[in-house]
Amino acid sequence: MEIGVDRPACEANAVCVGLAPAVFDLDDEEELVIAPGPVPADQVERVSAAVKACPKNALFITD
């Protein structure tokens, strides 16, 4: 499983960071940062919840 983001739609409100901080973060400019590579198996549930909870529907599963 890999995650993508629609950058123009993302408002960096950090809901995903709260749900899956091992995968999502905000940089110093308040831009979303996603850990590179496939989502670790122990984070799949958290990341799936974050994708569903994104208020702007900016996150999506690519694989």
Image (tube, helix red, strand yellow):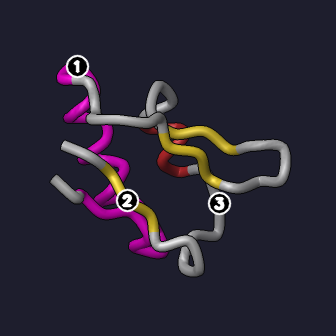
**Residue stretch in magenta:** 41-61
Which numbered disc flags the more N-terminal residue, 3 or 2?
2
Label for residue 42? Answer: 1
Q: Residue at x 37, y 59 (%)?
A: 4
Which numbered disc flags the more N-terminal residue, 1 or 3?
3
Residue 16 versus residue 5 in the image, above or below: above
* Residue matched to label 3: 12
User: x%, y% of residue 37?
Assistant: 34, 35
Query: Is 22 left, or right, of 43 in this rendering?
Result: right
Circle nearer the viewer, 3 or 2:
2
Which numbered disc flags the more N-terminal residue, 1 or 2?
2
Query: Observer-nearest residue: 8 or 50?
Result: 8
Q: Amino acid at mark 1?
A: Asp
Label for residue 4? Answer: 2
Q: Residues within 10 Å of mark 3 (few under 14, many from 20)?
A: many
Q: Residue at x 26, y 46 (%)?
A: 2
Query: Is 15 left, or right, of 49 in this rendering?
Result: right
Q: Amino acid at mark 2?
A: Gly
Mark 3 and mark 2 in contact? Answer it, CB < 8 Å: no
